[in-house]
Image (cartoon, grey):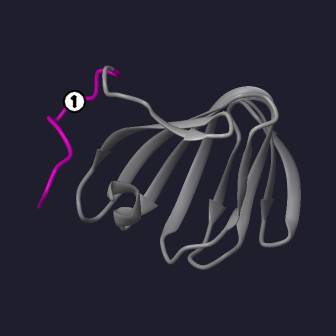
Amino acid sequence: MKLKKDLFFDGASDWEDLGGGVSRQFVGYNSQQMMVKVKFEKGAIGAMHHHFHSQVTYVAGGQFEVTVDGQTKVLKDGDGFFAQPNIEHGVKCLEAGLLIDVFTPLREDFLK
């Protein structure tokens, strides 16, 4: 099984600028799962999208308007959401913050 890095994450990995006030940092992954930190500036958008992966997202800071499967709710630090495979979801950052995304299986498209 391919690992992204050593067994421990120390936060020193590079951040990838995705544009529009959004950047991400890989925590770790193998073929079964992936954890990613996603940083948002106020007003930044995580556009509505879907994928075949299961996704669990934890709000580690800030405030986000989150839409999952047509339902919208404002989430803050300590909240989270679950996006089943192929369910449309997206976020709007209301207060600068950080999301922790976990995907199964890994998002190979992120690695290209």
Q: What residue is drawn where x is 40% and y is 47%?
A: 35
Crowd rating for badge 1 (residues with CA inside 10 Å; few <14, some 14–19, many 20+) = few
The foreground one among 15 and 58 is 15
The foreground one among 97 and 60 is 97
**Residue 104 percent across, percent down from the top left:** 40, 65
**Residue 103 percent across, percent down from the top left:** 45, 59
Secondary structure mostly seen in magenta is loop
Check disc 1 and give the amino acid type: Phe
Residue 31 lies, with reference to residue 95, above or below; the image says below
The foreground one among 5 and 59 is 5
The foreground one among 18 and 28 is 18
In the picture as drawn, the residue positioned furthest to the front comes out as 19
Image-based side of 88 in relation to 101, left or right: right
Quadrant of the image occupied by residue 12: top left
Q: What residue is drawn where x is 44% and y is 43%?
A: 36
Quadrant of the image occupied by residue 44: top right
Magenta stretch: includes residue 27: no
Q: What residue does disc 1 label?
A: 8
Residue 102 lies, with reference to residue 63, above or below; the image says below
Secondary structure state at the residue bearing disc 1 = loop
Image-based side of 49 in relation to 94, left or right: left
* Start-end of magenta stretch: 1-11
Image-based side of 63 in relation to 99, left or right: right
Q: What residue is drawn where x is 36% and y is 53%?
A: 34
Residue 61 in sight from this viewpoint:
no
Residue 83 in sight from this viewpoint:
yes
Image-based side of 28 in relation to 89, left or right: left
Quadrant of the image occupied by residue 93: top right
Q: What residue is drawn where x is 56% and y is 76%?
A: 85
Magenta stretch: includes residue 9: yes
Quadrant location of the C terminus in the rendered image: bottom left
